[in-house]
Image (cartoon, rainbow, N blue to C red):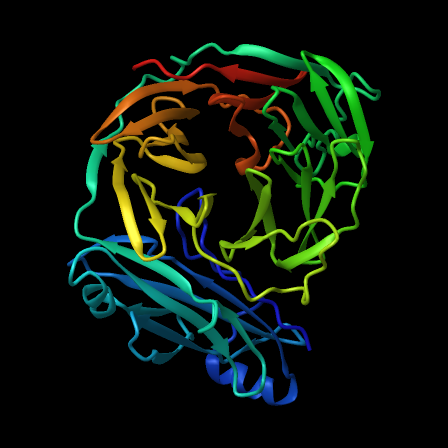
Amino acid sequence: MRVRTIALAFAGAVALVVGIPLSGEVGLGDASRAASLDPPASIDLFYTPPGLVRAGSTVRVSVDAICTTTGGSQCPVDVTLGTQVGAEPWETVTRSAESGAEFDVTDAAARAGGNGAGMVRFFLRAHTGTELATSAGNPRAPLKFWVVPEMQKIQIPAIPFGQVRKPTNVLFLPWGAGRTKAGLSPGRESLTGGPSSFDVDDRGRIHLLDTEQDRLAVFSEGELIREVRLALDSDADVSVAADGTAYVLEVRDDIAEVRAVSSSGTVQPAQPLGEALSAHVRTVGAKAYANLLPADAWVRVPEAGMIPTAAIPSDTFTGIPISGDAKLVRIATDRSIRLATVSGDEVSNAVEVQSDTPLGEVALAEPDGNGGYWCVVRVWRENPAPADQYHVLHISGEEIVESFAVSSEQFADTPPLSRFRLANGGNLYQLTTSPSGVRIVRFELGGRS
């Protein structure tokens, strides 16, 4: 019997409830009869995270849970939501997920924000009448959302489509096979594939995951200085720590695993981190962390030589690690992005950036080191002609102090969270692809709009 945990918190893009189509028109009564002969085999759990909310607002958690039998039929499933505020005991509510479930957590949010900023712990558990169950969070390692009394509203300035800033070219590799080229997998009945990720270290060297040629290639001033052979998945991600260690993250058989590659090119054995459909990795100083999606759970990557005690660790946490115990909370909709810094139960620098233009994924969100944020978000339009581009924002205090658009040039598919990096003294780097090859480009930051 397979238990598959899928808790959707589409961080970095629009928070959505996503359903999976079921085969056939199956009513609940039919599913109940089928389940008696055809036992439940898997449960998929999807939810919309509150993330960051204003005190006094209505707060709801929408959940979909889909139970499937061994024969592919629908089976009944219930969802339990548990919430805790401060030292209060856990409160639980259970509802049927027949047509989706919605839980009102307004009261818990009000108690958490009663004396200023606060935090609500919660978990979700989908379960059948048998022992089959799957969870998002648990009382020992709960999910969290934060409540703030105020959230500064800031309007994104409009930029005409096509009016993009020109970058500086840092690296160009034409398509092909070989040390000075980038591997390409032409799309026929699938997306065209190319390098899946990159990072820039403190010395400005480009670390490129050339997945089609199964290598991690390192370039300095446009010249290849090292390559490490690795069997790579098409969605592999890389991040380079301050000590020069590159952490390469992949998802295999629904389990995220990471390999550490030393600055000399030594590859450590893969270490499992947890269950995921996709994942990405980031480094803070010499430490590495993995974000397991779609659960949006973060976990510390064990240091080289340390083997985790279980494939799915219990010490997951919410929020993007940025320094010490500080985290960056990011939640987005199709018209706004909410950002805040949390440390323990303390919340600071909460802002809501609002847009008149529809938003897509948040490709990057980072602190600026002075209480503000750098953010890169895709914007799009349908009329007069479909178009999209990225909008780069520097948010400081109560205003956006720098704002410009950059091209979304993508010929080969690149995972959304692997296209931009803020590195090497605060410069913004972007991976772009065209019919001619791969480019890494740089935008120097620090001006005004």
Front residue (pair 338, 438):
338
Q: Residue at x 28, y 63 (%)?
A: 60
Q: Does residue 67 appear left or right of residue 274 in this picture?
A: left
Front position in the image: 301 or 285: 285
Which residue lies at the image location 29% right of the left edge and 53% below the top edge?
346
Residue 122, horizontal then vertical, whole percent: 38, 68
Residue 362 in the image: state x and y as whole percent: 43, 37
Q: Residue at x 72, y 43 (%)?
A: 260
Q: Is residue 140 above or below residue 276?
A: below
Quarter residue 254 falls in = bottom right
- Residue 416's spot in the image, x, y percent? 53, 36
Q: Quadrant of residue 83?
A: bottom left
Image quadrant in which you'd find residue 176: top right
Of the 4 image quadrants, the one containing the N terminus is: bottom right
Work out which quarter of the rendered image holds the C terminus and state it. Answer: top left
Report the number of numbered marks. Answer: 0
Q: Is residue 116 above or below residue 327?
A: below
Residue visible at 47% across and 62% down in the picture: 46
In this view, the residue in front, 246 or 107, is 246
Compared across the picture, whether 447 is left or right of 389 comes to left
* Vertical placement of residue 224 versus 126, above or below: above
Horizontal side of 170 relative to 10 (left or right) equals right
The picture places residue 121, in percent across and down from the top left corner, at: 36, 66
